[in-house]
Image (spheres, grey):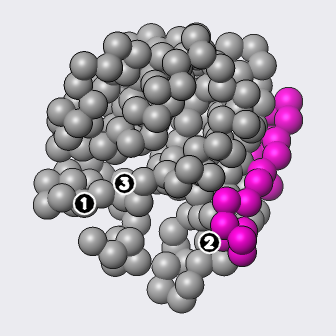
Amino acid sequence: MNITSLHEARTPEYWDRLYGVGYTPDPPSDFERQMLRAYTGAESGMRVLDVGCGKGQLSAHMADWGLTVTGVDFSLPAIKVARDMHSGRELLDFRLHDVTAGPLVPDPGPVDIVVCRLSYEFIDRPHFEERVRRWLRPGGILHITTTVSELMPQGVAHRGLPRARINELRAGWARMTWYSITQDSSFIGIVVKK
């Protein structure tokens, strides 16, 4: 499925339909994974919550690094595929959950890192950020991978985060930085520290 044909939506039913017909987002590249690991300081033994984990591609890579990873998504078809694809991994668990609308995730933490790869733009942010601050250990990291909406090609500008929203992430956190994943800086990683 072509990513440009996706329409921004937040309902589980929308994503269930997509995952039900075989939708798979592009997997994280080697470079993207290396940058995430470097900027978060991910080390074996750390605990990670992967929010909007989809089919669990990034969750599985992080478990391979020795991290204990809980992947959550509100799409049952995505969680079923993630569980099937990555069964038998000791450090990896997948749970069906809506991090903003439902009750709190069964206590995930404290966690060292919360990861949102291509999911943060679909989340009820104020509610979510309040929860993330409770889940993270002191000095913990919220890592967001997203597109910059102003730099997206015509027809997909609604996807990702606008620069103004990216700058607003600085508020209430000890430190915020971002880095480019693509040469044109349309796909970035954002790191905020508690």
Q: Which residues are magenta?
A: 167-186
- Which numbered disc flags the more N-terminal residue, 1 or 2? 1
Residue 17 can be seen, yes or no: no
Residue under the image location 25 percent in, 19 percent down: 88
Instruction: Give amino acid for label 2.
Output: Ser
- Secondary structure category for the residue under label 1: loop
* Farthest-out residue, left: 21
Question: Quick check: 166 above or below 170?
Answer: below
Residue under the image location 36 percent in, 54 percent down: 10
Disc 3 crowd rating (10 Å Cα; few below 14, some 14-19, many 20+) is some
- Horizontally, residue 2 falls left or right of residue 133, namely left
Separation of residues labelled 1 and 2 (CA atoms):
22 Å
Residue that label 3 marks: 10
**Residue 45 or residue 151, whichever sits in front:** 45
Q: How many marks?
A: 3
Residue that label 2 marks: 149
Instruction: Give amino acid for label 1.
Output: Tyr
Residue 190 can be seen, yes or no: yes
